[in-house]
Image (tube, grey):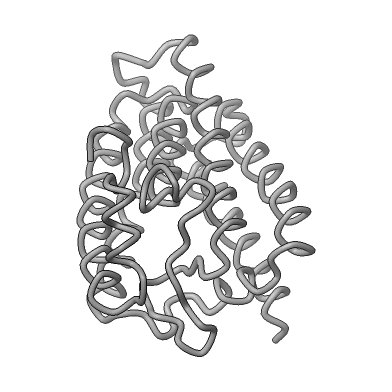
Amino acid sequence: MNPILKRIIQLLALTVLQAALLCLSAWSLTWLEGWLYVGTYLFLIAAASLVMLPGRPEVVAERSKGTHGGKSWDLLLTRLMAIPSLGMLAVAGLDHRFGWKPDAGFAAQVLGMLLFILGYLLVLWAMYTNKFFSSVVRIQKERGHRAITNGPYHFVRHPGYAGMLTSGLGTVLLLNSVWALIAWGLYGIMVVLRTTLEDKTLQAELDGYKEFASHTRFRLIPGIW
């Protein structure tokens, strides 16, 4: 299958899965926040396609490979990360269904929408800047893999993960669920672990990465870590 078409199908399948999970956990087809999340996610995918397909088709093709060629520890960690990632949606749906207290509140939902969009845009910026942006940790020797130092990589070494965490926080706030923050926290712990292991791998195996790390000191949050 054409890798770009394959990636499009993967993203659409993920969207359907998320929509189904939200509807089933909330046991409702009329949950406004759930459909707002799905609609915003689809809009962002469409916008990203307009940027990535003409500008970075090689990144789209790379990400269509899924877990192929990744480090064994990363394959396990990637699968484990899917649990709290989808768990955020499931808990938020159950929260809506059973009316657990407290809720996040309208102001938090507005903030959540902003964080969701900003986080996604940060990931998109990282993908567009880094032509080696992959779904898994692997050294892409066949593509002349090297350290990328411009764009968001000027500020942190792993802007993609930073964007994912930001977008995840935005998701639970947008869906008006304080309890879903627990799943987001577990996801955050796994992201930090993956960032640490990936950083060690890149410093050991990727040309120029040690020098890059010496200049860009922080991994996820400028001035903190």
Residue 207 against residue 173 in the figure, above or below = below
Residue furthest to the bottom: 142
For the point 44% across and 46% down, which residue is it?
154
Name the spot of residue 80 as percent of width and height, x first.
Answer: 27, 63
Residue 212 against residue 107 in the figure, above or below = below
For this rendering, which residue is in front, 43 or 62? Answer: 62
Name the spot of residue 84 as percent of width and height, x first.
Answer: 30, 49
For this rendering, which residue is in front, 103 or 25? Answer: 103
Residue 143 against residue 216 in the figure, above or below = below
For the point 36% across and 52% down, which residue is it?
157
Image quadrant occupied by the N terminus: bottom right
For the point 61% across and 61% down, which residue is it?
11
Name the spot of residue 4 as percent of width and height, x first.
Answer: 70, 74
Residue 63 lies left or right of residue 170; in this view the side is: right
Name the spot of residue 126 as percent of width and height, x first.
Answer: 53, 52
Image quadrant occupied by the C terminus: top left
For the point 23% across and 53% down, which residue is it?
190
Residue 57 lies left or right of residue 135; in this view the side is: right
For this rendering, which residue is in front, 54 or 182? Answer: 54
For this rendering, which residue is in front, 144 or 136? Answer: 144
Residue 82 against residue 178 in the figure, above or below = below
Q: Quadrant of residue 14?
A: bottom right
State the count of labels: 0
Residue 5 lies left or right of residue 209; in this view the side is: right
